[in-house]
Image (cartoon, helix red, strand yellow):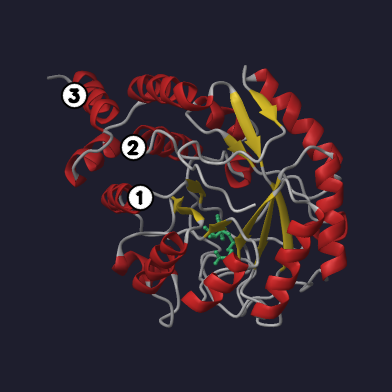
Amino acid sequence: MNGLTEQTALIDKLAAQEELSLSEYERLISGRDERSAEYLFSAARKVREKYYGKDVYIRGLIEFTNYCKNDCLYCGIRRSNANADRYRLDESEILDCCKEGWSLGFRTFVLQGGEDLSFDDEKICRIVSHIKRDFPDCAVTLSIGEKSRESYQAYFDAGADRYLLRHETANEEHYAMLHPSELSARERKRCLWDLKEIGYQVGTGFMVGSPYQTARHLAEDMLFIRELQPHMVGIGPFVPHHDTPFADMSGGSAELTLFMLGLIRLTLPKVLLPATTALGTIDPLGREKGILAGANVVMPNLSPLSVRKKYMLYDNKICTGDESAQCRACLKKRIAATGYKIVAARGDHCGVTEINI
Ligand code: SAH
C-alpha cells in the first residue's frame, strides 16, 4: 500500500470502530500529510454534523484568579513567576460577568483559575450556588484544578454541572518532564475518574507540541480519552511563555493540533470539542480551521477587560483587548464564515439525559 492509501484505510477503520491500537494511532499521527488530513477532516465533519448539525456552542470563560500554588513548567501564572501581576475577582464581579454574558446569549459559564487557596470550598460553593440561583437556565463549569473527592462532591452538590481538567499528557514520564515533582499524572487521572463518578460532565485534554512530546505520547493520549470517555476534550498547541523555564522551547503547530482534533472527533463522535484560544493565537484562522476539523465549541472570554492581560498562560494570547460583546460579535462572524452557526443554548453533551438544573 502506498502512504496515502494506508492513511485513508486507518482513518476509515477509526471512523467505523471509533478506536485504533496504540501503534495505529502513532502511525497515523507520524505519517500524516495534507491529503490525509483533508480526508480526516471531511470524515470528522460528517460525524459532528450527524450529532450536532451545524451548531456551535459557546462557553463564557471567566478567568477569576491568576494566583496559583502550582509551578507547572509551561504556565505563565506558575507560582515562581514573580513578574505575573496577580489578581482575583470577588463574587459580585463574577456575577456581573455572568449577567453580561447572559444578555449576550451565553448559557454556560466556565469559572477558570489557578489553584488559589483563598477560594476555599465554602467560597466556591457559594459562588456556584449564587450563579445557579440567578441564572437557573445556565450550566456552570469549574476549571480550578486538582481537589479532593470531597471538595468535588461539595461543588457538585452546590450545583456545578461540569468540570474541566486537562490531563495534559497521559504518559507518566512525559508528565514528570512538564511538572514539578509534587504533581503526577496518576493523581491527575484520579481526579478525572472521581469527577466522572460523582456525575459531572467531564472535560479533559492535552497540549499539542509540548516539550519532549512524541507521536507515541499523543497516541497514548488518544487511548486515555477513549478509556475515560469524557464529555469534552480541550486541546490546544503549547505556546511558550517568556517568564517560564520553557521560554525558549518551540511551540506546537496548528497543523498537528487540527489533525488531533479530527482524530478525537472520530474516536468520541459525540464529544464536545472546542476550537481553543491557543489555536487562534498561533494561527489567525485557527479557530475557524478547528471548526472545519470537527470542533463544535468556542469559548470566548467574559473576564473584565481590566484583568484580561493578566491571565497570561502563554505569550501573545488573543482577545485580551476586546470587551466581551466585541468578542462575541467577532466570533459570530468568524463562525458564520465557516458555514456553521453559534447557538444560544447550554450545549450539553448529546448523550447526557439527566442534567443538574
Ligand atoms: N488550574 C486549572 C486551569 C489551568 S489553565 C487546572 O489545573 O486545570 C488551563 C489550561 O491551559 C491548562 O490545563 C493547560 O493545558 C493550558 N496551558 C497552560 N499553559 C499553557 C501554555 N504555555 N501553552 C498552551 N496551553 C497552556
Q: Which residue is mark 2?
A: 267
Q: Earlier in the sequence, mark 1 or mark 2?
A: 1
Badge 1 residue CB within 8 Å of ligand 1? no
The relative height of residue 295 versus residue 2 in the rendered view (above or below) is: below
Query: CB atoms at circles 1 and 2 under 8 Å apart?
Result: yes
Tell which circle, 3 or 1, labels the residue nearer the N-terminal end.
3
Instruction: Answer with left or right where residue 286 lies relative to residue 221.
Output: right
Disc number placed over residue 6 in the picture, else none? 3
The x and y percentages for residue 128 are 71, 64
Q: Which mark is residue 225?
A: 1
Left or right of 254 in this view: 118: right
Q: Is mark 2 within 8 Å of ligand 1?
A: no
Q: Amino acid at mark 1?
A: Ile
- Name the foreground residue: 248 vs 221: 221
Distance between mark 2 and mark 3 Cα atoms: 18 Å
Query: On the rendered structure, is 101 left or right of 137?
Result: right
- In the image, residue 63 sits, relative to residue 117, either above or below, namely above
Q: Nearer the viewer, residue 95 or 326?
A: 95
Identify which residue is drawn at 51% across, 57% down.
200
Q: Secondary structure at mark 3?
A: helix
Quadrant location, ligand no. 1? bottom right
Which of the 4 image quarters holds residue 116? bottom right
Residue 307 as seen in the image, left or right of residue 156:
right
**Amino acid at the residue labelled 3:** Glu
Mark 2: amino acid: Thr
In x, y percent, where is residue 54? 58, 21
Q: In this rendering, which labeled residue sits more in front, label 2 or label 3?
A: 2
- The residues tagged by marks 1 and 2 sit, at their Cα atoms, a distance apart of 9 Å
Q: Residue at x 68, y 19 (%)?
A: 337
